[in-house]
């Protein structure tokens, strides 16, 4: 497995045909429910960025579970979001989503040092739905006691019907890889090892982003992301985009390639408007509709 054998995606035009356009007779539930579990007291904005990106990417119903301190202020600022305290999210609630069009995004804005939040990871892993793990939740999984509790839940999942996607940047990937071995940098070989060990589809974020799963014969490499995306909060937007596509029933591999490509295209549009220097993640989320509109295939 090496970068030279990668399938290269160099423009959004190459994958835009996979956009899940809604049918005329659809409703908000059949368009997919994206449940976002995000936002510690210190980082409520991460939850907002992920949710707005999920809405803009087509999810019919976006429900946010966040820290109780964030609920009122987010609900008032974003009335189209359904916002609940994550104190109300447990395994019983997670399992109630069985047989429904739903995907979960877990971890944007988590504080990896808040061990009490590990129960949220366990609850999300018990849900029979596609699950994207990002941010502080990845950091929690590097802790021995958290991983020991979560590993049986991963092993017991039907990973064909209910895949797990992990979206680490280099630093997060190195910490995840430490359970396997040591690496100064994570490349394609290590990404495949992560996919095998964590039984997940890995989206290794960077200037070029690699998407791999343990069953792939070659990685997919998205090469047109720009420097405008190298800002805190950009990954939260990406998690919401991919989560929305998973909620709409898109195959996990396709959802990741499509999501990374839409994120890159939205970044390019935002940079055209405001330059690579001035773009912030809110601008990238705002540009999602224009990126989609450019490739409306009807």
Image (spheres, rainbow, N blue to C red):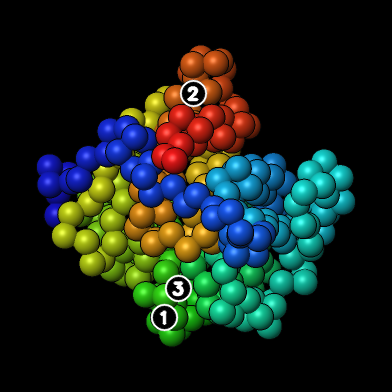
Q: CA distance from mark 2 to mark 1?
A: 38 Å
Q: Is residue 35 visible?
A: no
Q: Quadrant of the N terminus?
A: bottom left
Q: CA distance from mark 3 to mark 1?
A: 6 Å
| Residue at the image position 69 percent from the left and 52 percent from the top | 39
| Residue at the image position 56 percent from the left and 15 percent from the top | 274
**Does residue 86 appear to the left or right of 258 in the view shown?**
right
| Tags 2 and 3 touching, CB below 8 Å | no
| Residue at the image position 25 percent from the left and 66 percent from the top | 214
Q: Within 10 Å of the Cα at label 3, are there few (<14), some (14-19), or many (20+) other Cα atoms?
A: some
The residue identified by callout 3 is 162
Secondary element at image label 2 = helix
Q: Which mark is residue 228?
A: none
In front here: 85 or 162?
162
Residue 186 at what x, y percent from top left? 28, 48
Residue 34 at what x, y percent from top left? 61, 60
The residue identified by callout 2 is 269
In front here: 165 or 249?
249
The residue identified by callout 1 is 158
Q: Nearer the viewer, mark 2 or mark 1?
A: 2
Q: Is residue 54 above or below residue 87?
A: above
Q: Within 10 Å of the Cα at label 1, are there few (<14), some (14-19), or many (20+) other Cα atoms?
A: few
| Residue at the image position 53 percent from the left and 23 percent from the top | 270
Secondary element at image label 1 = loop
Q: CA distance from mark 2 to mark 3?
A: 33 Å
């Amino acid at each position: 497995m090496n970068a030279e054998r990668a399938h290269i995606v160099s423009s959004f035009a190459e994958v835009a045909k996979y956009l899940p356009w809604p049918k005329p007779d659809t409703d908000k539930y059949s368009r997919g429910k994206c449940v976002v579990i995000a936002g510690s007291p210190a980082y409520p904005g991460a939850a907002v960025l992920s949710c707005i990106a999920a809405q803009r990417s087509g999810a019919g119903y976006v429900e946010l579970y966040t820290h109780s301190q964030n609920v009122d202020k987010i609900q008032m600022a974003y009335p189209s979001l359904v916002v609940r305290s994550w104190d109300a999210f447990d395994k019983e609630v997670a399992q109630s989503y069985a047989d429904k069009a739903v995907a979960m995004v877990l971890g944007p804005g988590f504080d990896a040092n808040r061990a009490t939040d590990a129960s949220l990871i366990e609850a999300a892993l018990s849900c029979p739905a596609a699950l994207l793990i990002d941010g502080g939740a990845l950091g929690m999984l590097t802790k021995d006691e958290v991983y020991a509790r979560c590993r049986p839940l991963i092993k017991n999942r039907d990973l064909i019907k209910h895949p797990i996607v992990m979206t680490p940047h280099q630093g997060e990937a190195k910490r995840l890889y430490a359970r396997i071995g040591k690496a100064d940098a994570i490349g394609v070989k290590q990404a495949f090892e992560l996919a095998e060990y964590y039984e997940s589809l890995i989206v290794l974020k960077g200037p070029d982003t690699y998407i791999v799963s343990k069953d792939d014969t070659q990685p997919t490499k998205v090469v047109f992301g720009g420097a405008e995306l190298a800002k805190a909060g950009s990954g939260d937007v990406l998690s919401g985009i991919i989560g929305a596509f998973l909620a709409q029933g898109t195959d996990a591999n396709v959802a990741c390639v499509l999501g990374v490509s839409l994120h890159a295209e939205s970044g390019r549009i935002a940079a055209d408007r405001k330059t690579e220097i001035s773009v912030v993640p809110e601008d990238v989320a705002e540009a999602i509709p224009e990126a989609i509109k450019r490739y409306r295939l009807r």
